Image (cartoon, rainbow, N blue to C red):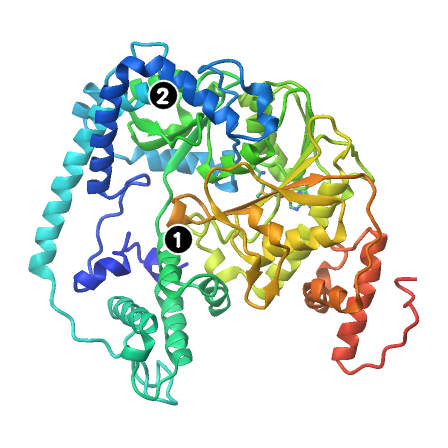
Amino acid sequence: MGRRQKNKQGVPPSLDEIKKKAPKPVQKKRKLEAEKPVASRKRKLEKEKKALFAEEEAEDEQLVASGAEEASSNDDEFTGFGSEGEDNDSEVEGAGETDEFDLDEMEDDSDEEDSIFDSDEEAQARPMFSDDSGDEQDLELANMEALSKQIEEEEEQEAEEAEEELHTNVVPEAPVVLPPPGEDTDEAGLSQDLGQVQLRMQEIVRVLNDFKTLCEPGRSRTEYVDQLLKDICTYYGYSRFLAEKLFEMFPVSEAIEFFEANETPRPMTIRTNTLKTNRRELAQALINRGVNLEPIGKWTKVGLQVFDSQVPIGATPEYLAGHYILQAASSFLPVMALAPQPHERILDMSSAPGGKVTYIAALQKNSGVIFANDSNKARIKALSANIHRLGVRNTIVCNYDGRKFPEEVLGGFDRVMLDAPCSGTGVIHKDQSVKANKTAHDFDMLGHLQRQLLLSAIDSVDAESKTGGYIVYSTCSITVDEDEAVIQYALKKRPNVKLVSTGLEFGREGFTRYREKRFHPSLKLTRRYYPHVHNIDGFYVAKLKKLSNKIPTISNTEEEVAEEDEHEIAVSDNLGAHSEELTFNDEADKEIIEASRKKWLKSKGYKVSNKKSEASA
Ligand SMILES: C[S@@+](CC[C@H](N)C(=O)[O-])C[C@H]1O[C@@H](n2cnc3c(N)ncnc32)[C@H](O)[C@@H]1O
């Protein structure tokens, strides 16, 4: 846990902000989860208000048109849902859920909600929906009053805080940035006071961004980066290993934005369960209970963002009746990419606690069959509970190791969703323990499991499916090891698949090169999401199309084999107690393991014979 979190220091100012201000030991009050900067929210609101009133007359036509446009802008897979007009909640968005929303944790959420203050006035000012035809725009109008009031109050509070800061701040001295050459931070007595550390980070970032002009004579870039990493560990509470791993993914300033974003929660969001209601009705019901909300964005017609509430969001009658599920917005994305069609046979290989699988069922309108699998028995409980509460009836819950598909369980699916177990580097704001707990060994083991699960997912799909033949791979981690590297491995091991567009409207392109690694150019088609860029959890989504049920022979050169399976060397080095869980069950893999083993033995100085070892014979 980071020192800032442990000390409950609340949301610290961003580094941009501290450029303008001196550090203050007393931190600001923690903002509400969904809170955006007041000025920008107000501007947005005013803009929306104008647009809404201007367009009011053309509302119905516009809604229908925008629905049609959205349907047509997506893959062919979506056409099955396209013809039912605006109330057709079978829109192409997908949903999913990450662990934090499982039932066990719902109580905690509720407690948090209880503590959110909302004035009576705001509640009274809540407008009602009077028109059946509206959707997103009605909803925004309905919330306008409440939001305006809230924003005004926030403005007043911010003005008070600014005034307070003016009186309490002392202009700081320029921080000492680097210890004298040859000394480390402690020896040199560099301050560990968090305010000072924060200032030092800001100063180092400034120097690194204009190194030639600003560096101390004789000091190298590496020295600055090293001190910055030390400070990141001190200030945010990361292990050196993870700080480096994440730091090297971004340009320097952006890396700090990423670390900052992990200190604040993402907006609370819910997904309308279209098996039971539609978003407009749900929004009205919740507004009537004192929930302040608005649509998440144009890209989803089922998502709502909750700003604050007078009632616990995880315990309203609507919640208990299964009209919605608490679900991170990022988790909608893989299901949108999967784009399940009615009547299809679908496998969700690691589905607990069920956020994504219940959205798949909703998009299928309870038709077809879904196998909702998860290897963790304990999590199956929450999965079943969600399936029941949300009125999902087309789903069979099962409890296998995903790697047993298709051979020992079942294959021939139209589509497979693999929302893989991962390190959770995209959701650090929810689980601060990731900062200190994840080791290189964990990443090796996860990468290995993810690769195996993905090959099983691919093998479980029927390439001849009339409507499908797709696999979606997603993680709530942003590390290349768990994302592009896993897909690259699958492309090489299964030349009978290719990457296709996810159909998602936003998100950064996947890496085609990362440090010394080079990936297939089609990795560009995959999508990356970041908390500091998209204000959603860090996420990765890739969509594959299976072209044939036959796996073409792989003619890898020895060098390619060694390159692809670099991580396997590390894994075999590390197998130890976990070796039973991680045995390969695939002939092709055995050869690769053997090649890796030989390379590893050679690297350790052993003489390696060209005969096959007993284990692989
Ligand atoms: C990211 S969570 C899935 C979240 C889920 N898709 C949702 O939307 O609610 C990853 C899941 O993988 C499961 N898992 C881990 N190893 C597995 C394996 N070998 N086979 C199948 N599931 C596995 C974990 O129990 C965990 O529930």
Q: Which quadrant of the figure has residue 181?
A: bottom left
Asked if residue 483 lies left or right of residue 497, the reply is left
Q: Which amino acid type is shown beneath numbered disc 2?
A: Ala
Along the viewing direction, whichever of 377 and 290 lies nearer the viewer: 290
Q: Residue at x 51, y 49 (%)?
A: 509
- Neighbourhood count class around disc 2 (C-alpha, 10 Å): few under 14, some 14–19, many 20 upward: many
* Residue 268 at x, y percent in the picture: 38, 36
Q: Quadrant of the N terminus?
A: bottom left
Along the viewing direction, whichever of 560 and 130 lies nearer the viewer: 560
Name the secondary structure under disc 1. Answer: loop
CA distance for labels 2 and 1: 29 Å
Q: Which mark is residue 239?
A: none
Q: Quadrant of the C terminus?
A: bottom right
* Residue 504 at x, y percent in the picture: 51, 37
Q: Residue at x 71, y 59 (%)?
A: 578
Q: Residue at x 46, y 24 (%)?
A: 69
Q: Which amino acid type is shown beneath numbered disc 1?
A: Asn
Q: Which mark is residue 283?
A: 2
Asked if residue 227 lies left or right of residue 544, the reply is left
Which residue lies under the disc numbered 1?
262
Tell me: residue 355, above or below residue 282. Answer: below
* Residue 591 at x, y percent in the picture: 84, 61
- Mark yes or no: residue 118 visible: no
Identify the mark nearer the N-term, 2 or 1. 1
